[in-house]
Image (spheres, grey):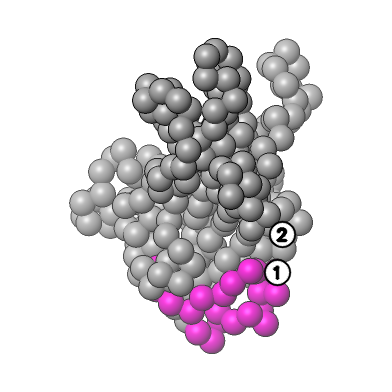
Amino acid sequence: MSVHEDFAQIAREDGRAALVTVVRGEHLGEKLLVQPDGTSEGTLGDPELDAQGKADADDLMWKESSEIRGDLFIDVTAPDPRIVIFGAVEYAQHLSALARVCGWRPYVVDPRARFATPERFPDALGVVAAWPEEAFEQLGALDKATYIVILTHDPKLDDATLLTVLAADVAYIGAMGSKRAQADRRERLVAAGVSEADQARISAPVGLDLGATNARETALSIMAELAAVRHGREGGRLCNAKGKGRIHAEAKAKA
């Protein structure tokens, strides 16, 4: 098959890849297919263009955005974003449901098998009764399109999860907890050797300030923050955003 056909097949299988096409210049029409692991098929007809195409493809396939950059058009296909929720609690039930409504792929993880059951989380695409490292052996490796939400209130699971996900390049890490719980967590992570820069990657308490008063509204505040992060926004009321550019983020590219 041609690289264009291979790209179309990846899109049909809901995979991730970028097809780079020369749209100007002497190599007009040449194509390069780039995979998430950096491997590629085809050529743009020039080693420098190939290097540029691979770099742009790696950037845009994780941003889920198709763009023209210089003489190249980078067409991206990507699966729906993945959210891994740690803690088989009521908040996770509502967050899984909202994630599915919003077109995300939710998974629930908790080592307590009596709580982590598919029956309790019908909207989750997978429920894993395991500790974090083992869970990701089942769910697939952490990547730049994975969003992590920690809802357990259990220091043992919180810390194990954070130490695992902070070692990877993920899109987002959010954790529930009061100011006291956050302070205690910070002390434990410092003792475990976690840097200030890595601690700053944790959004805690998780969610936007909606004044939530129950589990459903709390899940809504979390889902709202995830959407804002995905689209590069801070959140807030649209009526206060006048004159600050587009109201809606540009749609994520699909082949």
Q: Residue 78 carries which label?
A: none
Position of residue 4 measured from the top left corner of the image (x, y, whole percent): 61, 41
Q: In which quarter of the image is residue 51?
A: top left
- Establish if 29 lies above or below 38: above
- Identified at 38% across, 73% down, the residue is 134
Residue 207 visible in the snapshot: no
Q: Disc 1 marks which residue?
A: 123
Dot 1 and dot 2 residues touching (CB under 8 Å): yes
> How many callouts does the rendering have?
2
Position of residue 189 measured from the top left corner of the image (x, y, whole percent): 28, 54
Q: Disc 2 marks which residue?
A: 100
Residue 17 visible in the snapshot: yes
| Front in this rendered view, residue 92 or 109 | 109
**Part of the protein shown in magenta:** 113-132
- Establish if 173 lies above or below 58: below
- Identified at 41% across, 23% down, the residue is 46
Is 2 situated left or right of 191 in this image?
right
* Residue lying furthest bottom: 114
Q: In which quarter of the image is residue 184?
A: bottom left
Question: Which residue type carries mark 1?
Answer: Asp
Is 212 situated left or right of 54 in this image?
right
- Identified at 50% across, 35% down, the residue is 32
Residue 164 belongs to the span the image colors magenta:
no
Position of residue 26 measured from the top left corner of the image (x, y, whole percent): 52, 14
Residue 128 belongs to the span the image colors magenta:
yes
The kind of secondary structure element at disc 1 is loop
Name the magenta segment's main secondary structure.
loop
